[in-house]
Image (tube, rainbow, N blue to C red):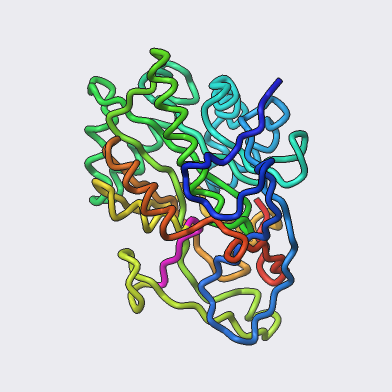
Amino acid sequence: MPKRKHLDDSLDYTAKEEDSEQEFSALDESSSDDSEDEYDEIPVEFEWFDPQKQDFEGFQMLLRQLLGTDASFFHLGAIADLILDQKLLGSTVKTDGNQSDPHSVLTVLNLKQHKNKPVIKALTNYLLDRAATDSSLSPLLSLLAPDGGNEVGLILSERWVNIATEVVPPMYEMLLEEIKWAIDDKEPYTFSHYLVWSKIYHAVPSTLDETTNRPMKKMKPKSSDGVNGGQSKYYFHPEDEVLHRYAMFHGDFDYKTPVPEGDSRNAFQDFGITPQGHLIMLEAGALKSAVEAMKAEFPFSPATSKMVADESWSPTP
């Protein structure tokens, strides 16, 4: 029977109970400092599980969100199958027991081990194509070369927009531990590098504001290095900025498929957001230090973990 994951007592996370069930709420990660914005907080209880077969549909939805408008280029069911085939590697976060839908997933896929699988070929070719469009990503061309000797682990991490960043450090901590166990069991997870597939967005004039005469939310522009006052660039995953500090390189890329105007399935344009893909490459040894820094920056505790129901900004996948 699939086990529920427990937070390790040695990980120094506050707010643990004997049965590892805590009541938390998730933190609003909006960069808005507008004092007039008000949100309703919904108390929730986060639980960690291994990926399980009932997560198949939920994984496809999360993958569709992560891969953006280019998700249609890939067989999402095949990626979900690879995640599930790994059994005890990777984690999900749920809020209503084992049989409920996953609200977050984090796992790693061995690109070299699965290189002959059609979906991994499609993902790798896509990454090489996108890397060629941005000089900051050009080192990826040699690291993912078919004849190269690199063992690259592709980290896939996604969660629903109102789920706290604070749930992520425990997931990375568990992943590192599971990789160690897998290596001890002679499984193919001795990686030379980790490639994190993520996403960012830029603020643009909102078509919704134009049609409703509603004022736009105030946001603090951030440049690509996280310093206020640069481009209007924001991170769907705030932990990416921690990973940057330990990365070999990172960069953004445009999706091949533009966001369709008036597409009811994607509210990004209406809400004044232009999304892009984002890639972060780390040497394998750097990930542990990055996770320690992530834990310090986003400590998991009842005082900081809040789930916010923000009806004013809720793009659907």
- Please say if 80 is above or below 160: above
Left or right of 39 in this view: 294: left
Q: Nearer the viewer, residue 124 or 30?
A: 30
Residue displayed at 69% across by 43% down: 94
- Please say if 238 is above or below 68: below
Determine if the magenta segment contains residue 250. no
Determine if the magenta segment contains residue 236. yes
Q: What quarter of the picture does the N terminus occupy?
A: top right
Where residue 174 sits in the image (x, y, percent)?
49, 36
Residue displayed at 38% across by 22% down: 189
- Please say if 75 is above or below 224: above
Residue displayed at 55% across by 46% down: 158
- Name of the residue lying farthest toward the top: 186
Left or right of 149 in this view: 98: right
Where residue 149 sits in the image (x, y, percent)?
23, 21
Q: Nearer the viewer, residue 311 or 69?
A: 311
- Please say if 56 is above or below 272: above
Where residue 264 sits in the image (x, y, percent)?
71, 57
Q: Nearer the viewer, residue 133 or 231?
A: 231
Instruction: Please give the range of residues in magenta.
Output: 232-237
Residue displayed at 62% across by 61% down: 302
Left or right of 102 in this view: 189: left
Residue 136 visible? The answer is: yes
Where residue 113 sits in the image (x, y, percent)?
39, 18
- Where on the picture, by quarter, is residue 260? bottom right
Tally the numbered discs: 0
- Name of the residue lying farthest toward the front: 18
Residue 121 visible? The answer is: no
Q: Nearer the viewer, residue 72 or 14?
A: 14
